[in-house]
Amino acid sequence: MKLNYVFICFRKGREDRAPLLKTFSFLGFEIVRPGHPCVPSQPDVMFMVYPLDHNLSDED
């Protein structure tokens, strides 16, 4: 598989939003800004992205 990014999403109104942000940020995910072309426009949903580094793997 040739993937460049892994996206996750969750509702902004979740009670556990702060721990989710902290955990996924620790794992290397970054918050996706509204209007990013790779995610749909949904005002009640938050997206995070993890860019994959293809230099770490020799698999094709």
Image (cartoon, grey):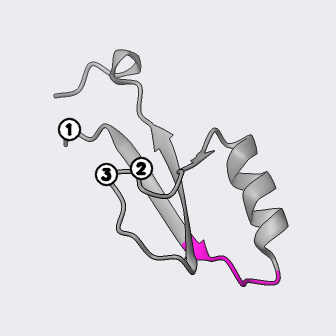
**Which mark, residue 6?**
2
Residue at 63 percent across and 38 percent down: it is 28
In the picture provided, is 15 more to the left or to the right than 31?
A: right
**Contact? badges 3 and 1 (CB < 8 Å):** no
Q: Residue furthest top?
A: 55
In magenta segment, residue 52: no
Front residue (pair 24, 17): 17
From the viewer's perspective, is residue 21 above or below residue 55?
below
Count of picture labels: 3
Residue at 40 percent across and 51 percent down: it is 36
| Amino acid type, residue under disc 3 in the picture | Pro
**Which mark, residue 37?**
3
For the residues carrying marks 3 and 2, which lies nearer the camera in this image?
3
Disc 2 on helix, strand or loop? strand
Disc 3 on helix, strand or loop? loop
Task: Please state the extent of the stretch shown in magenta in the rendering.
Answer: 10-15
